[in-house]
Structures are given as structure tokens and as C-alpha cells.
Amino acid sequence: MKFRPNNKFGSRDKLYTIILLLGIGIPLLYVGGGLYVVYDVSYRATMVGDVYEGEFITANYTRMSEMATEFEYYLDRDHLPFNYTLTVYWNNSGSDIWDLDEHGINESATAILRYGTAGDATIWTGITLAAECFRYAVAKKENNEPERLAALDMVKKLLRGVSLLIAVPSGGIGPEFPALLSRSVRPKDYDGPPLGDGYDQWDTNTHNRWDIFDGVGDYSDWLYKGYPSTDQHSGIFFGLGQCAKLVASDKNCDQWVKERVRLLAAQFAEHLTRVNFMLIDKSKPGYTRTTGQDFKIGFESSGFWVLSILKIASITEPQKYASLYHHWAVEKNYINFLNRDMRFFNVYNYYSFNINYLMICNLVSLEEHPIFRQRYEKIIRDIYYPIIRIGRNAWFNIGYIYMMRENSTKFQKDIEDQLMRFDVPRFPNGTKRIPERGGDVNGIPSYNRLYNLTDLINPLAKILYGPIIEGLEFDREILSYPRTVDMWDNSDFLWQRSTWYYNNRSRYLRQDSGIAYLLPYYMGRYCGIFPKSN
């Protein structure tokens, strides 16, 4: 074996060294420069000033109430086949699908071809439950007994859906059962429209699918889609928390609702404390997949997850769980895990911001202890307000008002404008968002706007990270003009998508559930920023 003398560094060594440095340095510059731009844009988005109010639509409260009634009609009629929330895809015979009567009926779109969003049904079911709980609370506040009973019927229907999503993989409801969660469920003998789309698809030969499992115990005649994520849990916890606060606490509420919320809260509290707040589910032979996400601490979740879950149980059974909540908050010091700066989620990982926002909104809205509230409110003002104040996100805005228990004229006008825009035509043929349907018959995009990419914030990163930046379509203009409702393509829940991120997709004959309107609308009514309609 020959060895090169140490004092010689030949041309070939220099070439190898240059290649090595370039191989390491260019990727680092590429990734680092791009991440700098993404972070810089997301940071500057909180610093560029106030939303321009000159083009706001003045609220018509009567029309807003009418739109809520219309969305309720479609939600109940089309989107709850198993009492949990799904998207609908309609058929079409070739004529104008938008030739609808007042209830959305059309001869060319009268049959459901399939249901969509089966992989994320649980988060949207939880949000739908929360919306109906706010509807119930508004009707109670306004002494509207027929509306209260109608809202109660929807709450019970959705609680049955939530119960199925938990009971099918867990074997039952109550603290004696584990609290495993599914993404969606269906009976084994189901012969209706296909369930799911894209990666959410339920295969016809379901037992050969790695993510489809047989139901447990008394639910063995059901199937469920497994591997739930933090997304699914956040929706369920928000819905259960608001149901406990706004509905089950009412002395006139149905006794079944009170007991069901108590059992579900206890089931989650017992199970998650037992497994140390880890999301773990079963796996088929030959597969090792498990979510394995730790609620306690992490990049996308923090101590408020633990406290939010335990807070629900503490208000449904205070004699049993109030001390446990206090133990995790104070003695385990989880209350000091709440100061995580989440500005990075503003545009780069916006849907994760929504997931965490559901949990922090649940926790803060349920909390009555003055010292705890003072702590929580400071975090909301310092961390969340700078992110949401110019985002034109009606859900984030009303969530802030709800948590802080104070009105903001700026937020109120912004929310009203966005909700009124559900009644503004989006497509060239004049279609609106009621029902919340997708593209027109010609497939024309919902919004198509070109941006000047020469004005990016960091010229070096633009060169090194150009394809990614162009794909994300970040520039200074977007920071000044976040997207409004009439510019959106269809989505399961508009407000989880970044208002600074534009795409031009339209889903042909897709109809979503309307919770993007119903949640902020009923929350606004509950908070008193929208008056009772005439």
C-alpha cells in the first residue's frame, strides 16, 4: 500500500477539496438562503402595517343570517351521511351545473358520486360540532326556542358521529375504553357512494389496505381508517370543549348530551394520561407505522395540548379532574411551555398554526382562573396577535375576540367583510359560494393573478432558491394584499390555508360543508359583534 507524503498537496487533492466544498456548500447556501426568505417573508408579514379597510363590504346582518340558514340546509342534507362531516362530489349530465333553485337542486347535479376528505373527516367534524354549539348558545341567549331545538338536534347528530369515530377503533365509549381515534369510519355492508378521494380513498378491497382496520368489540361490523394525526385530535378536542362549555352546561340541555360529553372527556383524559400523551395506534402485521406524536413538547405542539385536553375533563367532572389539570399546569410546570413563538407557522406551515390555534382557543376560552387567564392572555397578545392581525382570516380574528373577551372594531369589520364575500361572485359566470361548490363547467380557475418575482426580499436567496419561491409565489405584493374569500378555490376549511399563498385549482362539482362560514358567523353572534338579525 502506498502512502502520499504529508507535505505534498497535489492538484488532484485540490480538485477533490473543491468538489467536496462545493458539494457541501452549495446545498447549505441553497437551503439556508431559501429558509431565510421564507422566514423573512413570514416575519415581515406581521410587520407591514394594517389591513386597508377602504374596500371592505358593509355588513348586511339580515343577509348574513340568511346565508347561515342556507349553509345549514346543505350541511344537514348532504354532508353528514354517517353523522360526521364529509365533502360531496356531484354528478353532472353536461348541462349548466349552476342552474340551481333556492335549495341547490339541479337536474344535472342531483346525485352524489362520492364523498371526499375521508382522511381528514375527524378534524372537520369537531369544527362542525363547535359551530353548532355556538349556534345553540346564540339561540339560548336570544330566547329563540325553535332555533335552540334545531341546533340541539345538530349537536346530538354530530356527537353521535364523534362517538363513532372514537368507538369503532376503541370498542366503546367511556373511561374504561382506550381513546383511539379514527380518520373516518363506515359499515362493512355499506353500498352507497364511494368514500374518499386521492390518498383518502377507501379501497374496494379494504382488507388489503394498510390503513383500514376492522372495528373493535361491538363495532366489529364497521371498518375504520387509522393513523390519526394531531390534526384530527385538535378538531375533536375543540368541538368537545365548546360542547362542554356552551351546551352541556345548560340546565335545559338534553341529558344524553351532558352524559356523552362527560364520558368522552373522561375517556380521553384517562387514556392519554395513561400513555403519557402519546398518540399511538395499532399496526397490521408487516407494518410498523404509528403516529407516535408527543403532545407534551415539540416543534408543532406544546404544553397547551396537555392542558387543553385536561381542561375539558375538569369542567365536565371537576371533582375528579380539576386537581389533575392543576397538577399538570403548576406542579409539572406545563403552563410555562406556552410561550413558544409560532410566527414561523404564519405562511410556511399555516395549517399547523390552525391546528395549534384550535387547541389554544379551546384552553383559553374554558379557563376562568384569573391568574391562569392573565398568563394565557399575555401569550395571545404577544405571540398570536402579531400573526393574525393582518391575515384577513375570519376564524383567527373571531377566535382572538372570543379568547380575549373583548371586541376589536378592526377585526369586526374584517370578519364582516369576509363573511359578506361568501355572497360575492367568484367565477366569470357569476357563481357564489352558496352552496360552497368548486369550479365552473369550463374549469376556469377561481383566481388567476401574476406576480412580479423581481421584488423578492433577498436577491441571493432568489437565485439559489428560485424554484421554491416561485412555487410558493411569495413576494411583497402578497404581504400587502392577503387573499379574500372571493379569491379562494374550494377547500375543506378555507381558514387553514395561508391567505398569502395563492393557487389556481378549482374542484369540478365539489361541494364543501360550509363550516368556513358557519364557525366565524356563530362565534361572532355569540360574542355580540353581530346583532340579532331582523
Image (spheres, rainbow, N blue to C red):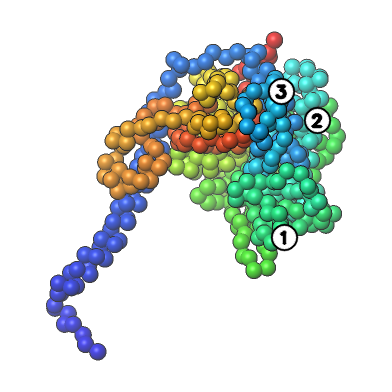
User: For residue 261, which quarter of the picture?
Assistant: top right
Instruction: Name the quarter where the N terminus is drawn.
Output: bottom left
Residue closest to the far top? 534
Q: Is residue 259 visible?
A: yes
Q: Position of residue 402 (x, y in %)?
A: 61, 27
From this view, report whether residue 10 is shown above or below residue 278. below
Residue sitting at 66 percent across and 60 percent down?
A: 210
Please, what secondary structure does the residue beneath circle 2 have?
Answer: helix
Q: Is residue 167 visible?
A: no
User: For residue 508, which quarter of the picture?
Assistant: top right
How busy is the neighbourhood of tag 2: few (under 14 within 10 Å), some, or many (20 plus)?
A: some
Of labels 3 and 1, earlier in sequence is 3
**Distance from the alpha carbon under mark 1 to that under mark 2:** 35 Å
- Dot 1 amino acid type: His
Q: Position of residue 459 (x, y in %)?
A: 26, 41
From this view, report whether residue 427 is shown above or below residue 5. above
- Dot 3 amino acid type: His
- Dot 2 amino acid type: Asp
Residue sitting at 67 percent across and 48 percent down?
A: 183
**Distance from the alpha carbon under mark 3 to that under mark 1:** 39 Å
Please, what secondary structure does the residue beneath circle 1 have?
Answer: helix
Please, what secondary structure does the residue beneath circle 3 have?
Answer: loop
Q: Which mark is residue 153?
A: 2
Q: Is residue 1 left or right of residue 45?
A: left
Q: Is residue 356 left or right of residue 142?
A: left
Residue at the spot of label 1: 207
Task: Please report contact status of discs 2 and 3: CB closer than 8 Å, yes or no.
Answer: no
Residue sitting at 14 percent across and 72 percent down?
A: 11
Residue closest to the far bottom? 1
Q: Between residues 5 and 359, which one lies in front from this camera angle?
A: 5
Instruction: Name the quarter where the C terminus is drawn.
Output: top right
Residue at the spot of label 3: 103
